[in-house]
Each structure stands twice: as structure tokens, then as C-alpha cells.
Image (cartoon, rainbow, N blue to C red):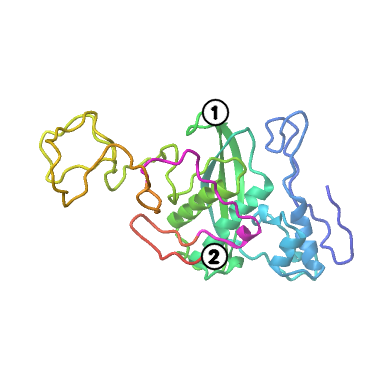
Amino acid sequence: NYFMFGGDVKGGKIMGEYPKSFRESDPTNIGRGRLIPTTSWDALFYGLTQWMGITDQKEIDYVLPNSQNFGCKLFTDYDLFNTGQQVLNGCGGAVYKTPITFQVPEIRMLTGEEQKKVCRLAARTSAKQFFNNDRTKSRCYVDNQVIADSEVVPGMYDVHGFAVLNFDGSIPAGTVQLDLIDSIAMAAAATASDFVVQGALPQSEAPSEMPSMQPSTSHLPSILPSMTTAPSDIPSEYPSFVPSQTKQPSEWPTGTPKPSIQPSIMPSISLLPTPEPSTHAPSISGSPTPVPTERQTFDEEFRTKDIGYVGFAGQSFEASPG
């Protein structure tokens, strides 16, 4: 509990909620008499920071780095002091909750730092998509995390939760589209799985540059048929118009007459390698590399990145640098 005294304080208020009861059925009771506060330490000091003269959002984030984990559950100096004038940007409008899921190797929830980075991706992308990069129009936090045995990868654990996006009351109705918010949250979770959440199973929607050792899992069939250089096990019923190409040698050598006296115009094909390499250019292989490609991890640079524009199936956007 925190108590605030002073001449300018709006006294006589209880900021937060008392437990309804001390029974284990109470939402604040996590067992053995332990109660979880309904109001964060950051919520109270957010307004105190503003009253002390720090009003720029970037400076507030520096002083209270965890305040971005609580969405609109913060108090401004107007809530706490008679002379307070500040408001909470990014609140007072529509609120969207969209599910997110991560696969992790051990039983744990997302850390506070991981939650901030997931929401930073979602908030930056929302600002770019809807508000001309104005970050003050929305806030985000991760809520209701639940752990279960993974339904995707046996032996791992699914961390289910919700990305809660709050939008400013000045935003006209219809500006923010719910289906796009779902796409943004999904893309933010996928990017965070690749680069942010420690040990998480990568789930990026973008293809890698190199083939993976394991096939990717998809709920939808591919648009184009898959291509392979290996021959089929069963011959086709009808001959093809174009001969098939394969890099695999036949099981039996083909029959051929005696070699001609004169050299042929076209080079002969041999099953044996030449004693000297024929070219200095690297060969192209259809097989995967023996080890997976290392994922690049963004550190400080990652703080300024967003996902880019998120669209629907059938839409495309030109990628921008970065």
C-alpha cells in the first residue's frame, strides 16, 4: 500500500480496489493468503512524475520503463493533484483484445520486458498503419497469460494471452479495423517469437532465405504445386510433353553403341565426376543445409523497428528499407 500526503493532493480517495473477500475464490487471491494488488506501483508514480514536470512520453518511459505494461491503468497528475492538467494519451476510445500464443520450452510466462517488446511492435505498427506514425494515439499491454501443454509441438508449452490495444478518444469511429488489428497482433507475436521471446519456437510468416531442416506447418494448402528434383516412385500413365529433369542418377546404366570416331557436337554425360572442377562458381543444391540458418537478433536497433504494413490475403505492399 502507498499513502500520499500534501496540500495539493486530492485526498480522501482510495485508488484501487480492496479484495471482495479473503476466500480463495476472490480474483486477487492466488492461494495461501497471498493477494495480488489491483493497481501497479507505476500507476501512482505516473501521475507523480507528471506533477514533477516530466510530461514528454519518451522521458516518462525512461523514468518509468514498466509503465507501458499496464495500458490505460495509470493515473495522471489530474487524477492525483488539484492543479494537475495532464491527460493519458492513447486512452478513452475503442479497446480491442486479440489472442496471441507463443511456444516456449519451459513452463513460464512472458517476462515484463518481453511483454513490452511485443506491445512495442504492435503499437508502432498500429501507429504506422492508422495514425501517420503518431505513437500517442494508442497503448498496448499483454493480459490473461495462461500456460498449457503445446498443441503444436509435443514437449513444449503454449503461452496463451491477449494483446489489449487501447485507442485515443479523439479517433473517429471506423478508423481502426478489427480484422487489421488481429493481423497486426498476429504479426507482432510472430516477429517476437523469432527475435524477442527467449527460446520461443519461431513462427514468422515471412519465408527464410535458406531451406529449413524440418518442413513448415501450415493450415492452408499452397497456391502452386510443390517442385521436386527427385523422380516419382510410380511412373505416370501417359508420357509427358517435356522430359522430366532429375539430379538423381538412374539405377541402371543406359544402353549405348560403341563410341563414335568423331567428337560429338554436344558434351557427353557421365556418372563419374571429372578429375578437376569444371567451374569456380558455387553449385546449387535442392537439399537443405545440415544445420539451420542462425536467426539474427536485434538488440538496441530492434527498439526502433516495426513490422511494416499488414494487409489481407491477396494484398501486397512495397517493402521499405529496414
The magenta region covers 285-307
Left/right placement of residue 269 relative to residue 200 reads: left
| Residue 197 drawn at (x, y percent) | 60, 45
Q: Is residue 223 left or right of residue 35?
A: left
* In the image, residue 296 lies in the stretch drawn in magenta: yes
Q: From the viewer's perspective, is 89 left or right of 223?
A: right
Q: Nearer the viewer, residue 167 or 236?
A: 236
Q: Residue at x 54, y 46 (%)?
A: 294
Element assignment for label 2: helix
Observer-side mark, 1 or 2, equals: 1
> Which amino acid lies under the numbered mark 2 shown in the image of this protein?
Ala
Q: Is residue 55 above or below residue 119?
A: below
Q: Is residue 276 magenta?
A: no
Q: Residue at the left extreme?
A: 238
Determine which quarter of the picture holds residue 81: bottom right
- Nearer to the camera, 23 or 282: 282
Residue located at (11% from left, 45% from top)? 241
Identify the mark at residue 127; answer none if there is no mark. 2
Q: Secondary structure at mark 1?
A: loop
Q: Residue at x 89, y 66 (%)?
A: 7
The residue wearing badge 1 is 155
**Secondary structure mainly formed by the magenta segment:** loop
Dot 1 or dot 2, earlier in sequence: 2
Q: Local crowd at mark 1 within 10 Å, few (<14), some, or many (≥20)?
A: few
| Extreme-right residue of the structure | 6
